[in-house]
């Protein structure tokens, strides 16, 4: 759990108001949003006054926490949450959800119970159903909420896919199921032979033969549990203590509890701690506390608006939130890495692009680790655009740093020249030669200075250009040179200037080529990374679908064994559809769409680079404020 947010006791996650409105509490949202670790979410549901809260306190490793009551009045209202460090999984948070008791006679809105039950299923990775006595016809009837799930929850968003809202699709979202039978006093035997608790549960879930409406009705909850929850477990618990002690159960020490209660409670806790998996969404994406908060908010908003919560839409909305956050995190990572690794100014463009490539790869991996869902390519394109802009900013800073450095060096080296020009030292016969020698001396010393960066030649060109009018004035005043010699010197100066311009043009062309090559590298690497990501998600989805196929095949075989050949035959279509899903993939379509988007982005970037490169030939980076240029010296009277 995020440091600085300790939870000494549970708090309300979803308040159930008297008018039936559900409200996600801000304090709980704040806590969840700060949990970036994977969460293992265990929710408990069941009739009111059946001891649900006590079991959750035991899972928390506490005697007190969730409110226990000793009267016939239900205590927990809405859904309460307790976030704790997971006792078995390092760097995971255990989120315990205690729900309002179902069937409370004091509640006027029975539909509200169905929503509490549905939310417990949608938010958890392990669901504990708590009941009293035995698993009999009455106990199964009390679990009628499970038969309403297809009316309360929709798996697909489009009308075309409504017929796919079947049990296989629900299984992608639904948690593991544990039936906790409290105050169980029977012997675990059938036909005179001992049976395990799991065998007892499976026996109770066998479909009853007969065509009577009543018989078919009692089979509905059995079928729903078998179809919706392929992972099932059962625990039976004796009474924890005698009746006189029950009202102060949370005060009792271990030695005060019945051994027949204490042992299964410990087994139950160990099972949940060791086997409950982190909460996931379809495709195997592990959910963090922040993602759980957004799921809860999305589901509650849908319920309050009168809509049926759509699981596909909820996951899509979650993916949008998480992928946008992944882009921001990746950009932040890039900026931090560039700030640490890039020393400005660089001597070459290759040096900067090399550091950029490393940081871009690491930032993209950060994005790929966090991003998921069908909309990855859209956000990856956004990331590429942002990283290209950041690279452009670093290139600009690099050039400016280099130019500033070079300007400072030239200012220092030319200070003596400036002073001599001001004093008229070169405004005498032979002055032009002395001026030219001094200028060459400055240029030679300048080239020996290390660490000038990529604007060394451009800064030198600007410096020489700033002395051009002074040089021409000195040349014209030099009486020792004939007009012909002056023309030769002027032509030499123009030739040197043109050569320097040509050199600068070649440098800019080389830099542009390097930038375009870097864009191609980005394009290829981004395509490769997305392909690997999509292949990983595709494999996770394939494995998930294969597990559902195996569950269906097992259920089909059990139906045949129980004599329900027609139901087994109806299941075949669903099995074939799942198998077909595993043989097809939209990966190629997604990759083609991304490649086109990236090519469009990089084409525009390349055009911008070309315009930027050639327009820069006409101007230098922003120069620091320079002192007034040397004025043309007046002719000496000497």
Image (spheres, grey):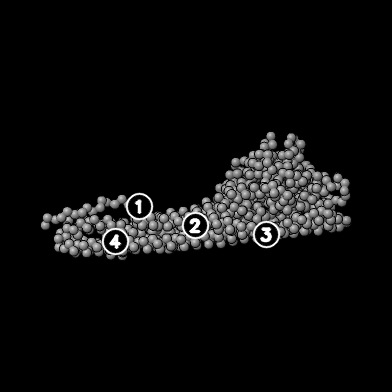
- Sequence order check, earlier mark of 2 and 3: 3
- Looking at the rendered structure, the secondary structure element under dot 1 is loop
The residue positioned 39% from the left and 57% from the top of the image is 614
- Sequence order check, earlier mark of 4 and 3: 4
Q: In which quarter of the image is residue 345?
A: bottom left
Q: CA separation, marks 2 and 3?
A: 31 Å
Q: CA separation, marks 4 and 2?
A: 35 Å
- Sequence order check, earlier mark of 1 and 2: 2
Q: How many labels does the image show?
A: 4
As drawn, the label of residue 249 is none
As drawn, the label of residue 602 is 2
Q: CA separation, marks 1 and 2?
A: 27 Å
Pointer 3 with pointer 1, Cβ within 8 A: no
Is residue 52 in sight in this rendering?
A: no
As drawn, the label of residue 497 is 4
The residue positioned 69% from the left and 47% from the top of the image is 159
- Sequence order check, earlier mark of 4 and 1: 4
Q: Dot 1 corresponds to which residue? A: 622
Instruction: Left or right? Give the position of 555 relative to 527.
Output: right
As drawn, the label of residue 584 is 3
Foreground residue, 472 or 621?
Answer: 472
Q: Residues within 10 Å of mark 3 (few under 14, many from 20)?
A: few
């Amino acid at each position: 759990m995020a440091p600085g947010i300790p939870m000494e006791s549970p708090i309300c996650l979803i308040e159930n108001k008297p008018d039936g409105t559900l409200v996600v509490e801000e304090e709980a949202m704040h806590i969840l949003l700060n949990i970036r670790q994977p969460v293992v979410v265990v929710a408990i549901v069941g009739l009111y006054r059946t001891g649900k809260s006590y079991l959750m306190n035991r899972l928390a490793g506490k005697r007190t926490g969730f409110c226990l009551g000793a009267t016939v009045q239900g205590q927990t209202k809405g859904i309460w949450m307790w976030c704790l460090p997971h006792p078995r999984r390092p760097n995971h948070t255990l989120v315990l959800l205690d729900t309002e008791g179902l069937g409370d006679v004091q509640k006027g809105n029975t539909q509200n119970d169905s929503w509490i039950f549905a939310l417990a299923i949608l938010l958890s990775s392990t669901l504990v159903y708590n009941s009293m006595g035995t698993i009999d016809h009455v106990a199964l009837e009390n679990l009628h909420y499970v038969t309403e799930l297809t009316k309360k929850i929709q798996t697909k968003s489009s009308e075309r896919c409504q017929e796919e809202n079947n049990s296989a699709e629900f299984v992608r979202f639904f948690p593991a199921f544990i039936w906790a039978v409290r105050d169980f006093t029977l012997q675990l035997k059938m036909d005179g032979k001992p049976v395990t608790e799991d065998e007892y549960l499976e026996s109770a879930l066998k479909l009853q033969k007969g065509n009577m409406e009543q018989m078919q009705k009692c089979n509905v909850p059995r079928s729903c549990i078998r179809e919706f929850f392929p992972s099932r477990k059962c625990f039976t618990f004796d009474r924890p203590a005698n009746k006189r002690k029950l009202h102060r159960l949370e005060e009792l020490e271990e030695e005060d509890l019945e051994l027949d209660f204490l042992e299964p409670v410990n087994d139950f806790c160990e099972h949940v701690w060791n086997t409950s998996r982190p909460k996931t969404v379809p495709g195997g994406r592990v959910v963090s506390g922040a993602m759980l908060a957004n799921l809860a908010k999305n589901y509650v908003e849908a319920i309050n608006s009168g809509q049926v919560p759509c699981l596909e839409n909820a996951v899509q909305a979650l993916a949008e939130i998480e992928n946008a956050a992944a882009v921001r995190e990746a950009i932040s990572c890039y900026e931090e890495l560039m700030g640490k690794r890039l020393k400005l100014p660089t001597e070459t463009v290759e040096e900067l692009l090399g550091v950029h490539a490393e940081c871009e790869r690491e930032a993209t991996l950060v994005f790929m680790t966090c991003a998921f869902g069908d909309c990855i390519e859209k956000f990856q394109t956004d990331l590429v655009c942002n990283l290209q802009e950041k690279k452009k900013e670093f290139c600009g800073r690099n050039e400016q740093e280099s130019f500033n450095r070079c300007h400072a060096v030239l200012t220092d080296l030319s200070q003596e020249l400036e002073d001599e020009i001001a004093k008229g030292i070169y405004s005498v016969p032979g002055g032009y030669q002395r001026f030219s020698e001094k200028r060459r001396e400055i240029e030679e010393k300048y080239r020996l200075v290390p660490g000038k960066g990529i604007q060394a030649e451009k800064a030198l060109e600007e410096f020489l250009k700033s002395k051009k009018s002074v040089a021409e004035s000195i040349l014209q005043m030099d009486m020792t040179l004939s007009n012909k010699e002056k023309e030769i010197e002027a032509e030499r100066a123009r030739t040197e200037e043109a050569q320097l311009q040509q050199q600068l043009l070649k440098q800019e062309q080389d830099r542009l080529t390097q930038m375009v090559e870097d864009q191609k590298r980005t394009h290829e690497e981004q395509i490769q990374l997305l392909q690997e990501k999509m292949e990983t998600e595709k494999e996770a989805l394939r494995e998930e679908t294969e597990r559902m196929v195996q569950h269906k095949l097992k259920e089909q075989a059990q139906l045949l064994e129980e004599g329900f050949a027609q139901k087994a035959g109806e299941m075949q279509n669903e099995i074939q559809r799942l198998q077909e899903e595993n043989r097809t993939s939209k990966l190629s379509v997604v990759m083609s769409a991304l490649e086109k988007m990236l090519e469009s982005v990089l084409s525009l970037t390349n055009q911008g680079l070309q315009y930027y490169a050639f327009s820069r030939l006409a101007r230098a980076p922003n120069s620091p404020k320079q002192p007034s240029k040397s004025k043309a010296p007046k002719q000496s009277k000497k």
